[in-house]
Image (cartoon, rainbow, N blue to C red):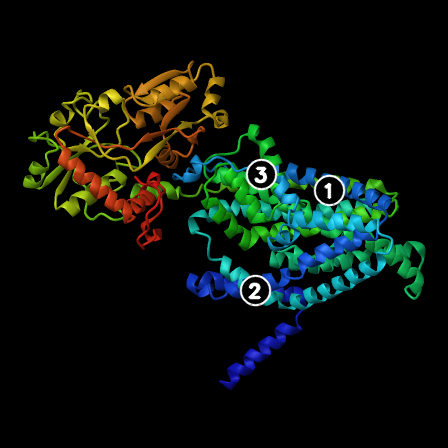
Amino acid sequence: MKSISRDFMQLIKRFNRQNFAAQVIEGMGVGFILGQLLPDQATTYLSPVGNGFIRLFQMPVLPFISLSLIAGVGRLEMHQAGRLLIRAGAVLVFFWALILLTVCLIPLGFPDWQQGSFYQPSLLETGESFDLVELFIPSNPFEAFAQTQIPAIVLFSLMLGIALIRIPKRKSLIKIFDTLCSGLLKISTTISKLTPLGVLAIVACSANKIGSSQIPRIGVYVAIQAGIALLFTFLILPLIVQGLTPFKAKKIINRFKNPMLIAFATANMLVVLPSIINIIKQLILEEKRKVHHISTHNQSASSALIKEIELPIELLTPLALVFPGMGRIASIAFIPFSEWMTGRPLIIEAYPEFLLTGLASTFMEGVMAMTFMINRLNLSNQLVDLYVTLDQTIIARLGTLLECSSVFSLVIISTWISLGNKHEQQRRLLPAAISYLSIPLFIATINAIFNRVPAPVNWEKEQMLSQGFAVAKGTAKIDLSYTKISEPGSWQRIKKQGVIHYCIMRNDYPMSYKNSSGNLVGLDIEIGLLFAEEMGLKPEFKLFKSFNKPIGKSTKLNKNFFASHNCDMTLSNVITSHKVISKFLSTRSLRDLSLSFLSKQPQFSTIKQWNDLKKYKTLRIGILEGKNLVDSTLSQAAPEAIFIRQRTNRLLIEALNNNQVDLVLMTTEKASAWTVLEPSLRITVPMPVQQVPKQRILPLEAKTLLRIWDDWMFFQYTTGVTEKIFDHWVKGIPVQSLNESTRGKSNLSTQP
């Protein structure tokens, strides 16, 4: 035991003798290994350590930003502030242009790997509004501090600083602010010594959240983001600084390596802000002493230089965090990545809105900004979880590394120019311009490399074609006989014979279909099995291509349907006209299905509203046979369209693949399943959402069966069983991932 203790202490001593950068890197490495080896429950014990570390680091930062801005602006004269901010704004806009151009190039690096996705309720949601006034103008500054609304905090601090400019006796107050800033800087320096331990806990808690099925596509995104961050940080930005100032690129990298490493390790730009300010001051002070031949022993001259350079630095550095930097803007590339990953690549026409929205959203905190963009673009809410996982694991670190580099580059260039210094060798900007060509070259290389790699397995399709039931037991028996049954829908006859006969449509993904084992599965099948099981009945399923044209028959959906087809009720949803439905009894609709379009051409992805259909003069829309409830909606939205009717959804998809139709109208729940089966298909949900009821029909004489069915379904709804089945088949959530606990009562419109 003593030898183990002695070895452990020796290990600690060796660790402490290493430089700080090595300690942080080792902390990240150990954290990643622990995150991969330890179970989820074990890593949760490390979560308070990581969260506590970040909170400690953030604790002095907001006060430091506010006090630095107030003091920095307050000691300026009006003409100084204007000159400084104009030059800094020009450099900032130049940086924005560079990174936005890069974001536009990133999708060119994605390989040709097609992918669909299961249904998500977010497809039916409209985008959220973006309130710049609320973000920037605080009604209560203390609330802005409490909620970390950095733009609002900065505006308040700037206005207070500008107000101080007009107060003659302000120097004593500014001196107090400077003293407080020094104290806050001491706090940050002390806490930074805990970085290796904090990083270990953070990385360990986030490294085990990425599923193996997502790794290939995530690998593409991470590789592109890593390459871009490294090229900008260690090549392009240092060369830009070298071209506009006398500082060599190598010197810039060496001076800022520790802040960049801490920013990368902690994924938090705020924690390195004080050290960045100090290094920039030292860097410019050294160069100014060199230019003016001032000795370090000349205290009066040095004090004058310090006073000259510290004002713009202390003002610009906190201010640079308010406006989106290159790292924050680069993170919006997650949107085209997520669109590509879910099989809905962002079309060129959508880029102007995407870039403007993305730039505006990056004034907010990273996860908040991405949540806003995902909601605005009606993407799956699960992408927020994926973004957070990637953000915590590696992407935020790469973005913060680039953010750190862009901030100190912006401050160095702006400060040097604002101090009236001129750099004669403007031709030194040529290497920086040439170096940017490394970005498209790198992206093209990534695309070529990953296109040579076999496309990853379509796990969603494999899951859909192999999964079994979530709740029901046994298998579904297909009735191939044409044996006549007496009194279809009669509960007395059903109980007496112990058999219930269901009519279902085949290839009706994800409601009823055969999986890769040849078993009949799907949401409707499981509901039918579960009902029969709990009623002590034997279920039998009769397959039909459609209810207008049954297999081997030509009988249409009329009042003799159940007698001629030998079944007691339909399990598949029936969307038909009010005239036809009046000939039957229909079950209570616990869920309204939404309407959407499937297409193969990207130009149809611009359809956001139903009225957008009127822009296309010769539109061919595929729709199921028979007059039904959606005809009036389509006729009003697309009066000049040509409607091509088919018997089944499969025939409609074949017509779409053969370019016989431009769009296929289908419920969103089913259309999403078809994108999983055929990833080349695109889904569009026009707004406002149009819905049709999910109803099953029965003979007019089946009133007892209808009452029992509706009561049983409502009970399954209240106990959460139908929600679990819906999540499994329509949302594609595996059985092992479903919540095993009984769910409480929720909105009726979310149940099958």
Which residue in the structure is indicated by mark 1?
92
Alpha carbon distance from label 2 to label 1: 33 Å
Secondary structure under the numbered disc 1 in the rendered image: helix
Q: Is residue 26 above or below residue 496?
A: below
Q: Does residue 548 appear in the picture of this structure?
A: no
Location of mark 3 (residue): 130
Q: Earlier in the sequence, mark 1 or mark 3?
A: 1
Q: Residues within 10 Å of mark 3 (few under 14, many from 20)?
A: some
At label 3, the amino acid type is Phe
The three-letter amino acid code for the residue at tag 2 is Gly
Q: Position of residue 436 (x, y in %)?
A: 70, 40
Picture coordinates of residue 202 (x, y %)?
54, 61
Q: Nearer the viewer, mark 2 or mark 1?
A: 2
CA distance separating discs 1 and 3: 23 Å
* Mark 1 or 3, closer to the camera: 3
The amino acid marked with disc number 1 is: Leu
- Is residue 542 shown left or right of residue 659? left
- Residue at which label 2 appears: 52
Q: Earlier in the sequence, mark 2 or mark 3?
A: 2
Tell me where residue 208 appears, x and y as whole percent. 46, 57
- Can the viewer see residue 447 in this picture? yes
Image-based side of 568 in relation to 729, left or right: left
Q: Which residue is more in the foreground, 575 or 678?
A: 575
